[in-house]
Amino acid sequence: MRENKNKLRQEVRSRLMGLTKEEHEELSNRIAENLFTLEEWKNAETIGITISIPPEVPTVRIIEQAWSEGKEVAVPKCDPKNKTMEFKKISSFNQLESVYYGLLEPVAETAKASKEELDALIVPGLAFTKEGYRLGFGGVIMTVSYLITEVIHWPLHTSFN
């Protein structure tokens, strides 16, 4: 199983890296525009969102759109030692710091967002199954299924492809 995931991870990453900058931007913009038309987006007051890493769909534009619509944005902060995660509210990209694996997470001083406050959760990845399971880069401590089912206690669901 692990070997198949690694092979698929390499294949998808290779295909994504093969896109031109213009193609990646166009496809990313289409995904963001589709997101902004969803009722889940329109009705959400607080968005939980991870900070993407290339070649994932960039989440910076999505975060900026949320702020422009007056939505609150909460980003996960992981504790790899204890294998826990909590969401922290940010109102500026200056409230992020680089942590393990080069990931960006909120600085410690940011306010915590409770799971009840999160109206929508947006998580980029390399690829997703039709059932909504994420193929990430591997090695990162939290999976999306863990994040959604164990941290937030929502059923696993995707709204668009």
Image (cartoon, grey):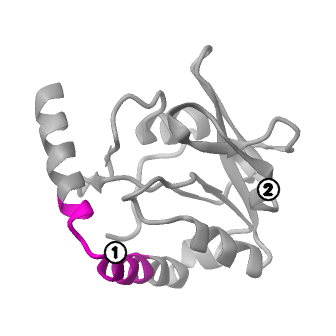
Query: Above or below — where is 94 with respect to 28?
Result: above
Residue appearing at x 68%, y 54% in the figure:
118
Residue 23 is situated, as x and y percent measured from the top left of the image, at 30, 80
Q: Quadrant of the N terminus?
A: top left
Mark-to-mark CA distance, 1 and 2: 26 Å
Provide the secondary structure element on which disc 2 rests. helix
Amino acid under label 2?
Answer: Asn
Residue holding disc 1:
24
> Which quadrant of the view contains residue 62?
bottom right
Residues 23 and 68: in front is 23
Amino acid under label 1?
Answer: His
Which stretch appears magenta? 15-31
Verify whether residue 20 appears in magenta: yes
Q: Main secondary structure of the magenta part?
A: helix
Residue appearing at x 18%, y 36% in the figure:
5
Residue holding disc 2:
94
Question: Left or right: where does residue 21 sit relative to residue 86?
Answer: left
Residue 113 is situated, as x and y percent measured from the top left of the image, at 78, 46
Provide the secondary structure element on which disc 1 rests. helix
Query: Above or below — where is 89 with respect to 37?
Result: above
